[in-house]
Amino acid sequence: MLRVMLEDADYCDVPADLMTFEEEAVVFWRDGEEVGRHRQARIRSLELLDVRSMTRKIRAARKNHPNAFRVWSAEEQQTLTDMFRNGATKDELVTALGRQPGGIATRLRSLGLLKEDEKLE
């Protein structure tokens, strides 16, 4: 598990076991599947997290957000895209997708639906 510290004191925890570098982007992988990506210019630091403490954190997060830290399926991404384009609120997205607001915002950014400096409302 990696903590990706981003500009503006923002961060996200990525369940990755590998990083690769593409044009201006860092791509995060787990078991051969892409689990996230961020623009290199936006990343301030990377921190390897204690696996045991992350296990507790994931369990705690999944009590309220059952899909927290899970890989996004194509169907979930399509639901997110459709709901976002139809004006769904942050709370509606959280409830429908069972994910944390930060994970939803990160996925929207990776899909090009939310600008890097834009907040999920």
Image: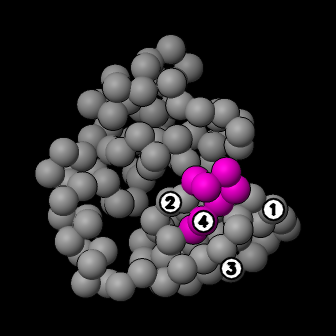
Q: Which mark is residue 5?
A: 4
Between tags 1 and 3, which lies in front? 1
Q: Nearer the viewer, residue 63 or 85?
A: 63
Q: Quadrant of the N terminus?
A: bottom left
Quadrant in the picture for residue 46 = bottom right
Residue 62, percent across and down? 20, 54
Taking 91 as reference, is 8 left or right? right
The answer to whether residue 46 is above or below residue 116 is below
Between tags 3 and 4, which lies in front? 4
Q: Which residues are magenta?
A: 4-10
Q: Which mark is residue 12?
A: 2
Residue at 79% x, 71% y: name it: 22
N-term mark: 1 or 3:
3
Amino acid under disc 1:
Ala
Q: Nearer the viewer, residue 43 or 86?
A: 43
Verify CB contact (< 8 Å) between mark 2 and mark 3. no
The answer to whether residue 74 is above or below residue 58 is above
Amino acid under disc 3:
Thr
Amino acid under disc 4:
Met
Residue at 57% x, 40% y: name it: 108
